[in-house]
Amino acid sequence: MGTDAVRITNASKHFGSAAALRDVDLQVASGEFVAVLGPSGSGKSTLLRVLAGLEELSTGTVVWASESGRPRTGVVFQDALLMPWLTVTENIAFAKRFAVHRNGFDDVYVDNLVRHFGLQRLSDRYPDQLSGGQAQRVAILRAVATRPRLLLLDEPFSALDPVTRADLQSWLQSLAVELAITVILVTHDVDEALALAHRVILLGDGGRIRQEWTLGRTGGEHARIRREILARYHPAVEATHE
């Protein structure tokens, strides 16, 4: 991890009189994997949408490392949103249909992604022939097919069964390392955040950062941080997880 990929300063976002984000200060290093936790309504998805350029801040600033502004960014939501009339490979290569990507798009790179990350046997299937986990793999590869420097994930595994979810978490971790991209993951799942991230950010009611943790690699440290997150996440949560 090197210099900051993005720096958010004194950021607030209001929808009418309701604050979705309030006074957020956050720096994300290049190559870092950051998980954003928080209860419903704490501003997790709003933060992601601001970073994706889908929402404007009410106040505050977002400063990118590049002088040209926001780097090439891939975004994946909870629903895979695949094009039903396209095959797996065609869905992954969908970005080349847009003028902004057309000249620099590399079909060989798409083929390499499909093969390297285990989707070759699915390449000619259509979305209605895929499981939920397979569809999310396709959605993630579609997001990285343009060689983004930043990958934004909004609860991409929340609708999947526990076994498929665990498999995809491991797959995503390998993909992030091999492609050397910065990842920001929004999730409700504390264990998912601990398994994947270098750092965990906890948002509270009103969209404020409640606390953050930098993770080491030891199981004992993760157990301690898990207890701290649950205690801060919601006063009643810890007792239900003991």
Image (tube, rainbow, N blue to C red):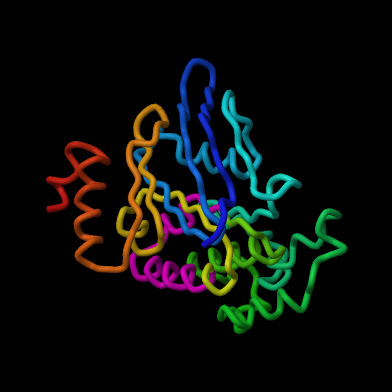
Asked if 142 appears above or below 236 in the picture, the reply is below
Q: Position of residue 193 (x, y in %)?
A: 37, 56
Q: Report the magenta residues as a range.
A: 152-175
Q: Please report the residue visible at 59 percent of the width from the left and 38 percent of the height from the top.
A: 50
Q: Which is nearer the eye, 190 or 57?
A: 57
Q: Is residue 11 left or right of residue 209?
A: right
Q: Please report the residue visible at 45 percent of the width from the left and 40 percent of the height from the top.
A: 44
Q: Position of residue 56 (x, y in %)?
A: 63, 31
Q: Please report the residue visible at 71 percent of the width from the left and 79 percent of the height from the top.
A: 111
Q: Quadrant of residue 179?
A: bottom right
Asked if 234 appears above or below 112 in the picture, the reply is above
Name the residue furthest top. Answer: 17
Q: Is residue 157 left or right of residue 119?
A: left
Q: Is residue 228 left or right of residue 46?
A: left
Q: Quadrant of residue 149?
A: bottom right
Check residue 168 for magenta coloring. yes
Check residue 41 for magenta coloring. no
Q: Position of residue 53 (x, y in %)?
A: 66, 40
Q: Is residue 61 left or right of residue 185?
A: right
Asked if 214 appears above or below 10 in the picture, the reply is below
Q: Position of residue 174 (x, y in %)?
A: 49, 73
Q: Please report the residue visible at 58 percent of the width from the left and 63 percent of the height from the top.
A: 181
Q: Quadrant of residue 128?
A: bottom right
